[in-house]
Image (cartoon, grey):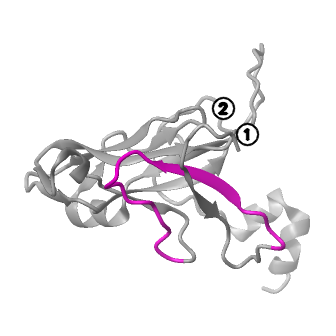
Amino acid sequence: MTDVLNNMHTISITNSSVTATSFAPTLLGVKRLTDTAILPAFATAGAACFDLHADLRADGYNQVYFRESEVIRTGLAFDIPEGYALMIYSRSGHGFKNDVRLANCVGVVDSDFTGEVKIKLTIDNEEGFIVEHGSRVAQAMLIKVPCVQLVEVDELKTTERGANGFGSTGTSANVVTAEEEAATHPIMTSRHLDKK
């Protein structure tokens, strides 16, 4: 891992059901940019994301109250491995209980960005929202990004849907009868029709 961040800590991203000897974890470097920043952690062994906490004390606050949107510091920067990206998501509890979400819905942190990760929260009601220092304000997931080469083509592949856009697949369930399924896939479905 490139040593672009000094004094960095590491988070071991791994599946808890797989032993360390059979699966090498991916290391994600994290640097505290302030003395009051809180290192992220996974809440449970099966959690897909780790939590990001508000670092309000870096600016001399213990809590902030907002009615529309607010930018929240985390006081953290990440050394994301090449070939990966850090995805930032809203917390489920914020959305379901308080109508609070990320202003940009999903944040994407590229592997070559080493600045502070900040969270902009937006509230979709008129009640307002309070964030305290140390509050969990978002969750993050490290994902592998495939190496892609863009190639200009003259023609695209032919599909059943084609260029049909919004609503083209209908709004109700498309129920297929057993006979229609058998006509399309006779080998796969004949054994089920024989049981009638």
- In the image, residue 76 sits, relative to residue 173, either above or below, namely above
Q: Nearer the viewer, residue 100 or 144?
A: 144
Q: Quadrant of the C terminus?
A: bottom right
**In this image, 112 relative to 194: left or right?**
left
**Res. 146 mark:** 1
Query: What residue does disc 2 label?
Result: 162
For image coordinates 87% across by 68% down, the residue present is 188
Q: Amino acid at mark 2?
A: Gly
Q: Residues within 10 Å of mark 2 (few under 14, many from 20)?
A: few
Quarter of image, res 22: bottom right
**In this image, 36 relative to 86: left or right?**
left
- In the image, residue 55 sits, relative to residue 113, either above or below, namely below
For image coordinates 85% across by 82% down, the residue present is 194
Q: Amino acid at mark 1?
A: Pro
Give the Cα distance between marks 2 and 1.
25 Å
Q: Which residues are magenta?
A: 21-44
